[in-house]
Image (spheres, rainbow, N blue to C red):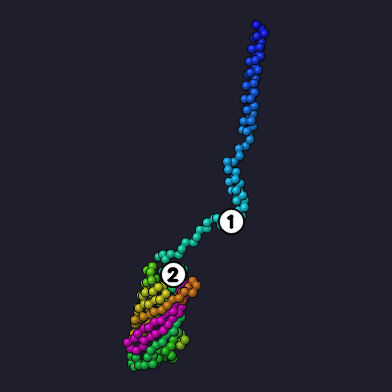
């Protein structure tokens, strides 16, 4: 009986060890596999992205940065561009003036301007200053209000001042035309009408107005001339 019990216990131990050993051996590779770092899911993508980033030069990276573009210059209420397009502009004027009938008896007492003012020639140099205000129309037509003061006769040692105020139009930002009043310190004919027209080309950032004017006179001493200058 003891012998039979010993055989049963021995066979049970052998069977248990045979089933237990493969489980332990199967667990070891799993543990080893768990200890190894996991490989990236997409190794090729990872390598290519890293390579591209390494190959990019500073110049290539700089081109990727979107540089802000300068805003377009719109025709706002402040004008087109400085200084030519500002609403108010001003500048000096140089010019020439011719007096019609300067040697004819058109003055009181039968005198002429030549005798009264002791002029040597009907041609005179003009020196003046002008300012104008532009009402921008945002199209091909603008409105102008102009005022200027001039002095003539300096080359003949004379000082003959005059002041003018005009209202007119500006066509296509270049051509101007206007009409207004001209005042002189002349007791016989202190006020006259004046008409002017001209062209204002741009030279760089300034304007160079070239204008012609005409001042009619019922007595025969009409004046005409031209001025050129600079605006800023």
**Relative to residue 42, is residue 97 depicted above or below?**
below
In space, the residues marked 2 and 1 are separated at their CA atoms by 41 Å
Is residue 69 placed above or below 128 in the rendered structure?
above
Of residue 207 and residue 25, the one placed in the foreground of this image is 25
Q: Is residue 218 magenta?
A: yes
Q: Position of residue 143 (x, y in %)?
A: 37, 72
Residue at image coords 50%, 60%: 69
Left or right, residue 32 beside residue 125: right
Q: Which residue is mark 1?
A: 60
Q: Which label is found at residue 201?
A: none
Mark 2 vs 1: CB contact within 8 A: no
For image coordinates 42% across by 82% down, the residue present is 226
Rendered location of residue 146, percent (x, y): 39, 75
Residue under numbered circle 2: 85
Asked if the magenta segment contains residue 163, the reply would be no
The answer to which quarter of the image holds residue 132 is: bottom left
Magenta residues, start to end: 209-232
Query: Is the residue marked by circle 1 packed among few (<14), some (14-19), or many (20+) residues within 10 Å?
Result: few
Given residues 98 and 204, the one toward you in this image is 204
């Amino acid at each position: 009986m003891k012998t039979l019990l010993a055989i049963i216990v021995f066979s049970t131990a052998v069977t248990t060890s045979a089933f237990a050993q493969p489980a332990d051996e199967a667990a070891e590779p799993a543990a080893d596999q768990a200890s190894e770092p996991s490989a990236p899911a997409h190794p090729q993508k990872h390598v290519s992205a890293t390579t591209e980033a390494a190959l990019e030069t500073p110049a290539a990276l700089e081109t990727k940065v979107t540089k802000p573009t300068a805003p377009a210059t719109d025709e706002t209420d402040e004008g087109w561009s400085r200084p030519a397009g500002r609403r108010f502009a001003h500048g000096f004027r140089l010019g020439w003036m011719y007096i019609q009938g300067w040697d004819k008896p058109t003055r009181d007492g039968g005198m002429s301007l030549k005798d009264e003012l002791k002029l040597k020639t009907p041609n005179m140099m003009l020196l003046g200053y002008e300012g104008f205000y532009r009402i921008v129309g945002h199209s091909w037509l603008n409105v102008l209000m102009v005022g200027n003061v001039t002095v003539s006769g300096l080359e003949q040692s004379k000082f003959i001042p005059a002041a003018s105020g005009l209202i007119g139009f500006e066509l296509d930002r270049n051509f101007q035309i206007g009409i207004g009043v001209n005042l002189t310190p002349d007791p016989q004919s202190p006020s006259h009408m004046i008409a002017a027209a001209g062209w204002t080309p741009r030279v760089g950032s300034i304007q160079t107005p070239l204008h012609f004017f005409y001042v009619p006179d019922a007595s025969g001493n009409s004046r005409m001339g031209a001025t050129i200058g600079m605006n800023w």
